[in-house]
Amino acid sequence: MSRQPPFPPFAAVIWDVDGVLLDSEPLHFHALLEVCRRHGVSVSDHENESMLGWSLPEVWEMLSSRHRFGVSREAWLLEIVDQYLARVDGSLTRPRVCRTIAEIERRGLPQGCVSTAERRIVLANLRAVGLLDLLRCRIAREDVAATKPDPAPYLLAAERLGVDARQGLAIEDTPVGIAAAKAAGLFAVAWPNEMTAGLDFSAADLRISSLDELPWPRIDSRLDSCRGAAPAMEAA
Protein backbone atom coordinates (compact mmCIF):
# COMPACT_ATOMS: atom_id res chain seq x y z
CA MET A 1 0.00 0.00 0.00
CA SER A 2 1.51 3.31 -1.06
CA ARG A 3 2.15 5.95 1.55
CA GLN A 4 -0.11 8.99 1.17
CA PRO A 5 1.39 12.49 1.29
CA PRO A 6 0.43 14.58 4.36
CA PHE A 7 -1.34 17.13 2.15
CA PRO A 8 -3.13 16.65 -1.19
CA PRO A 9 -1.41 17.81 -4.36
CA PHE A 10 -2.31 21.15 -5.86
CA ALA A 11 -4.62 21.14 -8.87
CA ALA A 12 -3.27 24.36 -10.44
CA VAL A 13 -0.70 27.11 -9.99
CA ILE A 14 -1.73 30.75 -10.46
CA TRP A 15 0.90 33.46 -10.71
CA ASP A 16 0.72 37.17 -10.07
CA VAL A 17 2.41 39.05 -12.90
CA ASP A 18 4.02 42.40 -11.99
CA GLY A 19 6.58 41.87 -9.25
CA VAL A 20 6.43 38.06 -9.50
CA LEU A 21 7.07 37.02 -13.09
CA LEU A 22 9.14 40.13 -13.66
CA ASP A 23 10.63 42.77 -11.42
CA SER A 24 8.49 45.50 -12.94
CA GLU A 25 7.35 47.44 -9.89
CA PRO A 26 10.18 50.02 -10.19
CA LEU A 27 9.32 50.50 -13.87
CA HIS A 28 5.66 51.06 -12.99
CA PHE A 29 6.74 53.57 -10.35
CA HIS A 30 8.94 55.43 -12.81
CA ALA A 31 6.10 55.55 -15.34
CA LEU A 32 3.79 56.90 -12.64
CA LEU A 33 6.34 59.51 -11.53
CA GLU A 34 7.06 60.67 -15.09
CA VAL A 35 3.41 61.09 -16.05
CA CYS A 36 2.51 62.79 -12.78
CA ARG A 37 5.45 65.20 -13.16
CA ARG A 38 4.18 66.18 -16.60
CA HIS A 39 1.02 67.33 -14.90
CA GLY A 40 2.69 69.08 -11.97
CA VAL A 41 2.18 66.37 -9.33
CA SER A 42 4.89 64.76 -7.18
CA VAL A 43 4.33 61.26 -5.78
CA SER A 44 6.21 60.33 -2.61
CA ASP A 45 7.84 56.97 -1.92
CA HIS A 46 5.39 56.53 0.94
CA GLU A 47 2.41 57.07 -1.35
CA ASN A 48 3.82 54.59 -3.85
CA GLU A 49 4.42 51.93 -1.18
CA SER A 50 0.87 52.30 0.09
CA MET A 51 -0.45 51.63 -3.43
CA LEU A 52 1.59 48.51 -4.29
CA GLY A 53 -0.72 45.89 -5.74
CA TRP A 54 -3.45 48.42 -6.62
CA SER A 55 -5.00 48.81 -10.05
CA LEU A 56 -4.31 52.04 -11.94
CA PRO A 57 -7.90 53.30 -11.53
CA GLU A 58 -7.51 52.86 -7.76
CA VAL A 59 -4.20 54.73 -7.87
CA TRP A 60 -5.92 57.56 -9.77
CA GLU A 61 -8.73 57.76 -7.22
CA MET A 62 -6.28 58.07 -4.35
CA LEU A 63 -3.92 60.55 -6.02
CA SER A 64 -6.66 62.72 -7.50
CA SER A 65 -8.18 63.04 -4.04
CA ARG A 66 -4.90 64.56 -2.81
CA HIS A 67 -3.57 66.38 -5.87
CA ARG A 68 -5.02 68.50 -8.63
CA PHE A 69 -4.41 67.09 -12.12
CA GLY A 70 -4.92 69.12 -15.25
CA VAL A 71 -5.85 66.04 -17.27
CA SER A 72 -8.76 63.59 -17.39
CA ARG A 73 -8.67 60.19 -15.73
CA GLU A 74 -8.80 58.41 -19.10
CA ALA A 75 -5.93 60.44 -20.58
CA TRP A 76 -3.82 59.90 -17.44
CA LEU A 77 -4.38 56.13 -17.51
CA LEU A 78 -3.45 55.96 -21.19
CA GLU A 79 -0.24 57.92 -20.63
CA ILE A 80 0.80 55.65 -17.75
CA VAL A 81 0.23 52.47 -19.76
CA ASP A 82 2.03 53.83 -22.84
CA GLN A 83 4.97 54.98 -20.74
CA TYR A 84 5.32 51.51 -19.21
CA LEU A 85 4.91 49.59 -22.47
CA ALA A 86 7.66 51.64 -24.11
CA ARG A 87 10.22 50.33 -21.61
CA VAL A 88 9.27 46.80 -20.49
CA ASP A 89 11.56 44.01 -21.71
CA GLY A 90 12.74 40.53 -20.83
CA SER A 91 15.68 41.73 -18.73
CA LEU A 92 13.19 42.27 -15.90
CA THR A 93 12.38 38.54 -15.61
CA ARG A 94 12.84 37.32 -12.05
CA PRO A 95 15.26 34.44 -11.34
CA ARG A 96 14.18 30.94 -12.39
CA VAL A 97 10.67 32.01 -13.36
CA CYS A 98 10.68 30.55 -16.86
CA ARG A 99 12.35 27.30 -15.82
CA THR A 100 9.96 26.88 -12.91
CA ILE A 101 6.87 27.40 -15.05
CA ALA A 102 8.23 24.96 -17.64
CA GLU A 103 8.86 22.39 -14.89
CA ILE A 104 5.33 22.76 -13.52
CA GLU A 105 4.02 22.34 -17.06
CA ARG A 106 6.07 19.15 -17.35
CA ARG A 107 4.55 17.89 -14.11
CA GLY A 108 1.10 18.27 -15.60
CA LEU A 109 -0.47 21.12 -13.63
CA PRO A 110 -2.47 23.82 -15.40
CA GLN A 111 -1.20 27.34 -14.80
CA GLY A 112 -2.58 30.83 -15.18
CA CYS A 113 -1.92 34.39 -14.10
CA VAL A 114 -3.93 37.01 -12.27
CA SER A 115 -3.18 40.73 -12.44
CA THR A 116 -4.71 44.04 -11.43
CA ALA A 117 -3.11 45.58 -14.52
CA GLU A 118 -4.77 46.35 -17.84
CA ARG A 119 -4.79 43.56 -20.43
CA ARG A 120 -2.31 45.46 -22.63
CA ILE A 121 0.21 45.41 -19.78
CA VAL A 122 -0.43 41.76 -18.91
CA LEU A 123 0.10 40.63 -22.51
CA ALA A 124 3.19 42.82 -22.94
CA ASN A 125 4.69 41.40 -19.74
CA LEU A 126 4.05 37.80 -20.79
CA ARG A 127 5.58 38.46 -24.22
CA ALA A 128 8.61 40.10 -22.59
CA VAL A 129 9.33 37.05 -20.41
CA GLY A 130 8.40 34.52 -23.12
CA LEU A 131 5.45 32.97 -21.27
CA LEU A 132 2.50 33.91 -23.44
CA ASP A 133 1.99 30.31 -24.61
CA LEU A 134 2.42 28.63 -21.21
CA LEU A 135 0.10 30.92 -19.22
CA ARG A 136 -3.00 30.72 -21.39
CA CYS A 137 -5.43 31.60 -18.58
CA ARG A 138 -4.87 35.34 -18.06
CA ILE A 139 -7.05 37.43 -15.78
CA ALA A 140 -6.63 41.19 -16.22
CA ARG A 141 -8.36 44.17 -14.64
CA GLU A 142 -10.99 44.28 -17.39
CA ASP A 143 -12.14 40.71 -16.62
CA VAL A 144 -13.58 41.35 -13.16
CA ALA A 145 -15.80 43.88 -11.43
CA ALA A 146 -13.50 44.02 -8.38
CA THR A 147 -9.72 43.59 -8.27
CA LYS A 148 -7.36 42.43 -5.52
CA PRO A 149 -7.75 42.21 -2.53
CA ASP A 150 -11.18 41.00 -3.65
CA PRO A 151 -11.11 37.24 -4.38
CA ALA A 152 -12.92 37.64 -7.73
CA PRO A 153 -9.78 37.47 -9.96
CA TYR A 154 -8.57 34.25 -8.37
CA LEU A 155 -12.01 32.68 -8.36
CA LEU A 156 -12.38 33.45 -12.07
CA ALA A 157 -8.92 32.03 -12.83
CA ALA A 158 -9.73 28.81 -10.97
CA GLU A 159 -13.03 28.52 -12.83
CA ARG A 160 -11.33 28.97 -16.21
CA LEU A 161 -8.67 26.42 -15.27
CA GLY A 162 -11.41 23.98 -14.26
CA VAL A 163 -10.28 23.53 -10.66
CA ASP A 164 -11.59 24.19 -7.17
CA ALA A 165 -9.87 27.37 -5.94
CA ARG A 166 -9.18 25.62 -2.63
CA GLN A 167 -6.86 23.25 -4.50
CA GLY A 168 -4.85 26.07 -6.08
CA LEU A 169 -1.44 27.52 -5.30
CA ALA A 170 -0.99 31.29 -5.70
CA ILE A 171 2.34 33.12 -5.87
CA GLU A 172 2.24 36.80 -4.93
CA ASP A 173 4.61 39.63 -4.05
CA THR A 174 2.30 42.00 -2.11
CA PRO A 175 0.01 41.70 0.92
CA VAL A 176 -2.87 42.87 -1.30
CA GLY A 177 -2.32 39.89 -3.58
CA ILE A 178 -1.95 37.49 -0.65
CA ALA A 179 -5.26 38.75 0.77
CA ALA A 180 -7.01 38.11 -2.56
CA ALA A 181 -5.62 34.59 -2.87
CA LYS A 182 -6.48 33.70 0.72
CA ALA A 183 -10.01 35.11 0.39
CA ALA A 184 -10.51 32.86 -2.64
CA GLY A 185 -9.30 29.84 -0.68
CA LEU A 186 -5.94 29.24 -2.35
CA PHE A 187 -2.67 28.31 -0.65
CA ALA A 188 -0.86 31.66 -0.80
CA VAL A 189 2.90 31.87 -1.23
CA ALA A 190 4.65 35.21 -0.73
CA TRP A 191 7.69 35.75 -2.94
CA PRO A 192 8.59 39.40 -2.28
CA ASN A 193 10.91 41.42 -4.47
CA GLU A 194 13.29 44.15 -3.39
CA MET A 195 10.53 46.76 -3.35
CA THR A 196 8.05 44.70 -1.31
CA ALA A 197 10.37 42.72 0.98
CA GLY A 198 9.70 44.97 3.96
CA LEU A 199 5.91 44.63 3.84
CA ASP A 200 3.81 42.49 6.17
CA PHE A 201 3.29 38.98 4.78
CA SER A 202 2.06 37.39 8.00
CA ALA A 203 -1.18 36.34 6.26
CA ALA A 204 0.70 34.18 3.72
CA ASP A 205 0.78 30.41 4.09
CA LEU A 206 4.43 30.40 3.13
CA ARG A 207 7.10 33.03 2.46
CA ILE A 208 9.98 32.12 0.17
CA SER A 209 13.15 33.81 -1.03
CA SER A 210 13.63 31.53 -4.05
CA LEU A 211 11.34 29.45 -6.26
CA ASP A 212 13.35 26.41 -5.13
CA GLU A 213 11.47 26.81 -1.83
CA LEU A 214 8.02 26.27 -3.33
CA PRO A 215 6.11 23.32 -1.78
CA TRP A 216 7.33 20.96 -4.52
CA PRO A 217 5.99 17.79 -2.83
CA ARG A 218 2.49 19.03 -3.72
CA ILE A 219 3.28 20.29 -7.23
CA ASP A 220 2.91 17.16 -9.31
CA SER A 221 -0.25 15.78 -10.86
CA ARG A 222 1.28 12.31 -11.22
CA LEU A 223 2.14 11.55 -7.57
CA ASP A 224 5.38 10.01 -8.82
CA SER A 225 8.93 9.67 -7.55
CA CYS A 226 9.85 13.30 -8.19
CA ARG A 227 7.49 14.34 -5.39
CA GLY A 228 9.37 15.73 -2.45
CA ALA A 229 12.27 17.26 -4.33
CA ALA A 230 12.72 20.59 -6.00
CA PRO A 231 13.46 20.33 -9.73
CA ALA A 232 17.05 20.47 -10.88
CA MET A 233 17.21 23.81 -12.67
CA GLU A 234 20.12 25.94 -13.68
CA ALA A 235 20.26 29.44 -12.29
CA ALA A 236 18.51 31.92 -14.56
Image (tube, grey):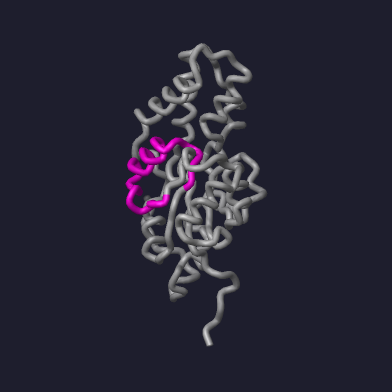
Q: Residue at x 58, y 60 (%)?
A: 166
Tell me if residue 131 comes above or below residue 10 in the rendering: above
Residue 99 lies, in percent from the top left, at 37, 55
Observer-nearest of 133 and 216:
133
Observer-nearest of 152 and 37:
152
Image: magenta residue range: 114-137
Q: Is residue 181 left or right of residue 125?
A: right
Total count of labels? 0
Residue 144 lies, in percent from the top left, at 52, 42
Residue 185 lies, in percent from the top left, at 61, 56
**Quarter occupied by residue 205:** bottom right
Q: Is residue 162 left or right of residue 189?
A: left
Q: Residue at x 48, y 57 (%)?
A: 13
Quick one: which residue is furthest to the right in this view? 202
Residue 52 lies, in percent from the top left, at 56, 35
Tell me if residue 68 comes above or below residue 181 in the rendering: above
Asked if the magenta segment contains residue 135, the reply would be: yes
Observer-nearest of 99 and 37:
37
Quick one: which residue is furthest to the front in this view? 145
Asked if the magenta segment contains residue 188, the reply would be: no
**Quarter occupied by residue 225:** bottom left
Q: Residue at x 59, y 48 (%)?
A: 151
Observer-nearest of 214 and 162:
162
Asked if residue 27 shows in the view, the reply is: yes
Asked if residue 209 shows in the view, the reply is: no
